[in-house]
Amino acid sequence: MPAAASRGKRTADDPTTLFFDDLALRGHEPLLAGASGSIQFDLNEGKKVDHWHVTIHKGNLSVSKKDGKSDAIVGVDKAFFDRLVRGRENAMAATLRGAMVVKGDLGLLILFQRIFPGPPASRARAKKKAAERRSR
């Protein structure tokens, strides 16, 4: 199992780090089984830019903090990305209104958005439906 990209700097108050750490630990994501490529997320926080590089090979994920060549580069404000990984924003809507800027393979981001959490209300409905199916 891959090591977490943040090397133990996991904090409950940093949803972005938690998101990428969880991806690194996941290793394989069935929702991305047909996808291959790399996405770099450039998260802007004032003058500071954090880079998160995700490589996908037929659903197998690896995550690093390197700044390198990618099929798609997503530029976004760090606070906005925190809301995105909490399910409070939508990646495609954000791209269409210019809150996220994508250079390169937009199709890869469209596939990747499958693993962003949905809105809190939809997650609660999904949990309720799963519990109902189990109780039958």
Image: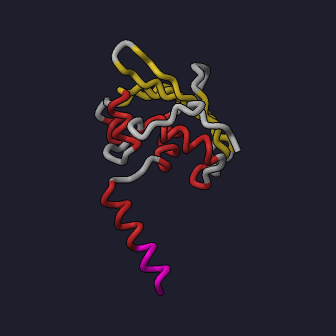
* Residue 129: percent from left, percent from top: 40, 73
**Residue 120, image quadrant:** bottom left
Q: Main secondary structure of the magenta part?
A: helix
Q: Residue at x 34, y 16 (%)?
A: 46
The residue shown at (55%, 44%) is: 22
Asked whether, in this view, residue 112 is left or right of residue 124, the answer is right
The image quadrant where one finds the N terminus is: top right
Instruction: Give the residue furthest to the bottom.
Output: 136
Where is residue 125? Give x, y as percent: 35, 67
The total number of labels drawn is 0
Q: Which sits in the foreground, 88 or 94?
A: 88
Q: Is residue 135 above or below residue 5?
A: below
> Is 89 in front, or is 11?
11
| Residue that extends furthest to the right in the rendered view of this protein | 1
Residue 98 placed where, x, y %?
31, 29
Viewer-nearest residue: 63 or 103 = 63
Magenta highlight on residue 134: yes
Q: Residue at x 57, y 25 (%)?
A: 65
Residue 95, image x, y percentages: 36, 35
Judged from this view, the residue extending furthest toward the top is: 47
Magenta residues, start to end = 129-136
Colouring method of the image: secondary structure
Q: Say whether residue 116 is magenta.
A: no
Question: Is residue 120 toward the left or the right of residue 18 in the image?
Answer: left
